[in-house]
Amino acid sequence: MDYYTTIAFLTISINIILITIVALNKNLSKKTRDGFIAAFSFILIGAVIELIGTIDEISASFTIFTKLVKFSIVPLMPLICTCTIFEEDRESLVVKFLKIYFVLYEICMYIEYFTYSFNMFYNITAKIYFVSFIFSSIYMFFKAFQFSNCYQNTNKIELVLIIIFISFGITAESIKEDVKISWLTIAMASAFIYIYYNELIQCVDGLTTLLNQKSFSNYIENVDVEVALIIFDVNDFKIVNDTYGHNFGDKILCTISKLLKDTYQDYGKCYRIGGDEFAVILTKELDMVDRLNKKFISSVSKQKILQPELPHISYGTVQYNPKNKLKYSATDALNDADAEMYKYKEQSKSNK
């Protein structure tokens, strides 16, 4: 088995394994699962065509066809992956622009192929191919960064490394055709993105997209800087569910989650830690905690004008310094925040 066949078989194997893993992953929504499977299937088809093109008995015209497929599809792969995974982006203005760009790219590529010899075609088109791939990749990673921010992940080093990895692979083949690692690079980068995505959703509450109770427990137990801990409770949420139904109650929780993010996300992390309980851990600008709490309560009051059914929200705040955890542990801080929250709730009831 020669070098090219080995690379092609490795790429095909990676994609078959990925498709199988995704198909068996019940933690993903059906739309997301189908999106990943579609993206990996596109890569698989491209790798199979390239493998066939390495067979000596295959005619020269088919070998040329495999190269045309590569030049046609590889620059599109980041865009295809983005549109299959992030379904809501399929009709965005940026995607429409990129679609128009790539239609023009395909037309120019085939005109150039039928006008010049194939060697000339490769030398000229490789530059356009590389630029086109960069455009498509920039959009994909912009969406990945946006998605990461939505899930409150501030560590982007994994995404940066993926960008470097895939850029290296595509650049290497653009410079030297014989390397033939573009499909393998795309397959491995796609695997990394899937792993990254899967890790993120394990930390997130499926309904509100806030970080979940497990993430909260892990963070508060391992935090190594002084933080402000805020616990929230939705007053009389059971009445909302009983009166308007659970679907309406879910919409209320999503509204509250958005208000929490809008208020606190620039200063820390927001969590859903129970059915109608939320938490925020501020890691910077701790002296602003009272101002932020007032801003949040004000935003809830304004939202009640649009959603009169929105319940009142109680909160309690404490400062926690892990350097003193032998005397004052994270559990103590949580208990005190809970106590402050219930004091606030009782005061709110007495003021009605």
Image (cartoon, rainbow, N blue to C red):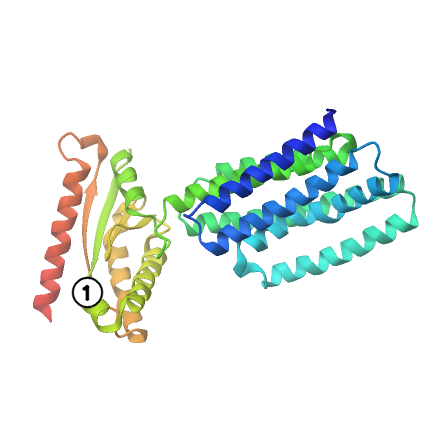
**Residue 282 in the image, given as x and y percentages of width and height:** 29, 46
Q: Nearest the camera: 157 or 30?
A: 30
Snapshot quadrant of residue 325: top left
CA neighbours of label 1 inside 10 A, class few (<14), some (14 to 19), many (20+): some
**Residue 63 in the image, given as x and y percentages of width and height:** 82, 39
> Can residue 136 be spotted in the picture?
yes
**How many badges with numbers are in the image?**
1
Q: What secondary structure is marked by label 1?
A: helix
**Residue 46 in the image, given as x and y percentages of width and height:** 70, 43
> In which quadrant will I find the N terminus?
top right
Q: Nearest the camera: 212 or 344?
A: 212
In-image side of 17 versus 8 (left or right): left
Q: Residue at x 30, y 61 (%)?
A: 253
Snapshot quadrant of residue 302: bottom left
**What residue is shown with label 1?**
238
In-image side of 4 versus 279 (left or right): right
Q: Nearest the camera: 166 or 267?
A: 166
Q: Nearest the camera: 214 or 46?
A: 46
Query: Relative to 13, does residue 39 appear above or below in the rendering?
Result: below
Type of amino acid at the residue the image marks with label 1: Lys
Query: Relative to 252, does residue 322 appear above or below in the rendering?
Result: above
In-image side of 316 versus 141 (left or right): left
> Can residue 153 be spotted in the picture?
no
> In which quadrant will I find the C terminus?
bottom left
In-image side of 182 versus 238 (left or right): right
Residue at the outermost front position: 57
Query: Relative to 41, does residue 222 appear above or below in the rendering?
Result: above
**Residue 224 in the image, given as x and y percentages of width and height:** 29, 33
